[in-house]
Amino acid sequence: MTSRGERALWAAVIVLLVVLGGILALQQRGPMKTITVPTTVTHTTTQTTTETLTHITTLTETTTVTTTVTRTLRERLVPATTRPPLVLAYTYLWYGVDRPERHWNDSPVTLVVDKPLLGYYNSSDPRALEVQLRQLEAAGFDGVIVSWWGQGSPSDRALRVLVELLETRVAGLRFAVMVEPYRGEDPDAYTEEWWRNVLGYLEKNYIAPHRDKYLHLQGKPLILAYSPIGSSFDPRQAFSGYTIRLVDGGDWYLWPHNDAGLAGALTIARDGYVALAPRIDTSHMVEAGAEKENITLDPDLSKGWYINQWLWVLGRRGNISIVAIYSWNEYHERSQIEPHIDGKTGEENRLLYDLTRIFIAVLKQDPLLLVGTTGPSRALMEEFMASMATCTGLLRATPHPGYTDHRRAYLAGDGVLALPVLSIFSPKLAAALVEALWRYGYYNNGIHTAPVLGSSANYTRNTSDIPVAEAPECDVEIYATVARKEHLEWWKYADRIVYAIINKTLEGSIEEAEKLFKQTLLGLWDGYGFNDSAANDRGCYDTYKVALALYAYRMLGALDPDFAAKYRGLAEIWVEILAKVQDPHGGLLTDYWVEEGEPVFGGACNVETTAIAYLALYTNYPLLLAWSSPGQSW
């Protein structure tokens, strides 16, 4: 059930999706309708000069996109050759569940109406924090702006945990610090000496040791300071080794104060900065006597204010360099996009998170937006993934009792691949999975985790599955997939080719990545599937390799509009295959084959295949990796 306000907002979303050509997979599979694919794709292979690919000739048609709408969408997606704006989230690390609790209704000024789907959490808890960072990554955020309340504060302790996670487990995000006025509202308290001490502490603990993870602007570490800091002593010229920006104090603003009419009309501030907020609602604190000013901007989400702001940004993409979302989790003013339970309706709200993910995809020129084919049901995939959870916190590999993997739970890859998926729709299951991954180890095998961790893959190495532990009370054995010493002929395996493409993209070698895609990967495509060495040995195609190919298409297509247009038809075929292999459990079948010229879908559905397909279709990981490559990133 959804509230009236959310239903109204969803109605606006549906209209928006139609106008944009059926954006990204919030839809379910519709009735099958057979149509003829009107195009063929030619490509150069390593063996022959040119080969015409035979397409599977049926697609699942659920939407009609007119030529005019498609052209409009294409113009929205590919008008610029430079990187898209940096997308950041204001993030608050002041929450605690110790006694007394911190910021969860522990005083009139810290009242909250809504509750995170993760439950009331401790911002210093690495399990909860990793789930949140995974959610931000999957949505396509580039980084977080962390509210910091001084040395030794709870937010300072939590920031140390966050930075450690960014260094070791969540490769796609970066961070910057916003210094809060923790000395009070007197601007004279923030002197030059105070600034010198603060910058010295931040430099020593967060900037110098984590320079690759710390956000820079104009080649210098970015430091934000919230009003009234800076209104007496101005630090911007005095500390020229940093790019210091005063928030609500002359440079940037925290949220759209001047849009009381809810038209979405924002202000492009210094550095091409804009800030968006889904809603602002302080009425509960006014009622409690903690606030005097009652600010209510679209409190029930019925006016479409957030959508209006995003459309305003998209219309001015070329003039904007930084898009900041206020906020990820500022619950006191109800501006959070973190998935939560709405305290006024009692209903689950993932809408604001999903909207943000969709608009980031448009902003980052996602080529999947041009694909008119509908993929597998996202909702059924999520139901399947949730049903695979065991009492260990890990996921059972397959629901089919006849398969060996029915009694196995894999760490890397299944567990790590499933983590961002669970983070999106079931943060509590994700937190249990994080704890299990930490408990059993083998977090990063350097191969299967590349699409999630954004780290270089050992794509030339062979792998083995090794037993790690037994959990008879959960009816599973714990396994890890690890790299072996011996190498394989990686160019004969479609999955390893995609991992090589990811490597080259992360290195900034985009031409080499495209060459691997066009020649090596498509050299294995026979019109039905990837006919690589594994397919030859087993007599069937692997579904997960189709999903990985789609992942590579989204990543490279975001960087090169001509590439996106050229291989759009092939991407539609891959999306269609993924739709057809979804079984009644909601998971995706592991393999398929061809009989008398027709594809036959079989095998067992499993967690690994379903997770990879979900990452390729319904998260923005491919875009995050694309725009974090050297030459593209900030």
Image (tube, rainbow, N blue to C red):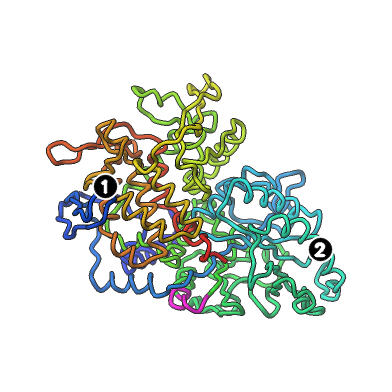
The C terminus sits in image quarter:
bottom right
Q: Residue at x 59, y 62 (%)?
A: 89
183 vs 314, left or right, is right
Q: Count the marks: how many?
A: 2
**Stretch in magenta:** 312-320
| Residue 52 location (% of width, % of height) | 19, 54
Q: In 3D space, how far apart are the residues under numbered discs 1 and 2 (Cα atoms)?
A: 56 Å
Picture layout, residue 33 above or below residue 248: above
Residue 317 falls inside the magenta stretch: yes
Q: Earlier in the sequence, mark 1 or mark 2?
A: 2
Residue 38 showing in the rendered view: yes
State which quadrant residue 286 falls in: bottom right
Of the numbered discs in the image, which one, if any, rests on residue 200? 2
396 vs 193, left or right, is left
The answer to which of 104 and 177 lies nearer the viewer is 177
| Residue 378 location (% of width, % of height) | 37, 48
Picture layout, residue 571 above or below residue 248: above
| Residue 585 location (% of width, % of height) | 34, 36
Residue 418 showing in the rendered view: no
Q: Which residue is mark 1?
A: 525
Viewer-side label of 1, 2: 1
State which quadrant residue 365 falls in: bottom left
State which quadrant residue 188 falls in: bottom right
